[in-house]
Amino acid sequence: MKHLKKVGVALACLALLSGCGGGGGGGGTGGDSIPVSAQGFWSGSNGVGEDFLMAVLPSGETWFVGTRNERLSYIIQGASSAVNGGQFTVNNARRVVLDPAWASTASFLTGTLNSADRLTVNGTALSFDTSYNTPLTFMDVADSYSTSGVSRFGQSPNATVTISAGGEVSATNLGGNCTAAGTLTATGKGVMSLSLTFNGSACSMGNGTTTRGIVVYDAEDRMFTAFSFNADLSDGFIAVGERR
């Protein structure tokens, strides 16, 4: 999932409050039939400094990340409806703006599946990434990672995240007395579901807060990216980890 590198670069730029360059790219299935859902990894750019990454899980759970001028801007989470005549909508979508920090707001995503490897969402063309079709396993990601994370109200530029061979996740060095622990769940696709609970009075997400989201992995760059929201969708985080 090569376009994750751009998200990782944007996260590093936001965490360090500096500007940098990016990279990335997509793939295609080579098909041209209209699929029955928007399930998959999608990425694209609107040509005016905004880049987008969308992940649609088998359940319809949808994550949409926007960067602006190589800096993370916002996360949108919702549930994709069934495709009807090539049209789909992400229902009950909520947006958390990370730069600058902003409250969660109602949002919307609508799109058209033009072919099996191309769709248009909110007016921007996105391309399908075939890495979605390769199942991500615990053994693929089990290791210790140097990690940088950001939420609306805090940053953790020097965190350590460990993922076990059984899918258990632990995070330390989040700042002060804050730690986190949780689990990954395989989906049979190139993405895993994540449940993570924060512990400690110094946690910017709040002591005892449980967030739910997804983890994707770039094997070539040995890097994971996690997206997650709290229960009331008022805050979320993005974290990028590189194998030590």
Image: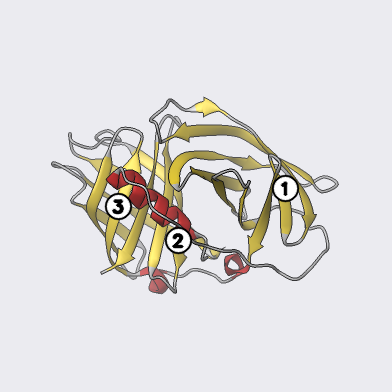
Q: Earlier in the sequence, mark 1 or mark 2?
A: 2
Residue 176, labelled with which disc?
none
Real-space Cα distance between discs 3 and 1? 31 Å
- Percent from the top left, x then y, of residue 79? 62, 41
Residue 205 sits above or below residue 43 on the image: above
Q: Residue at x 25, y 46 (%)?
A: 156
Which residue carries the number 1 mark? 120
Question: What's the residue type where badge 2 is placed?
Answer: Lys
Question: What's the residue type where badge 1 is placed?
Answer: Thr
Pointer 3 with pointer 2, Cβ within 8 A: no
State the SS at label 3. Answer: strand
For the C terminus, the quadrant is: bottom left
Which residue carries the number 3 mark? 148
Real-space Cα distance between discs 3 and 2? 13 Å
Pointer 3 with pointer 1, Cβ within 8 A: no
Q: Nearer the viewer, residue 32 or 198?
A: 32
In the drawing, does residue 172 fall left or right of residue 60? left
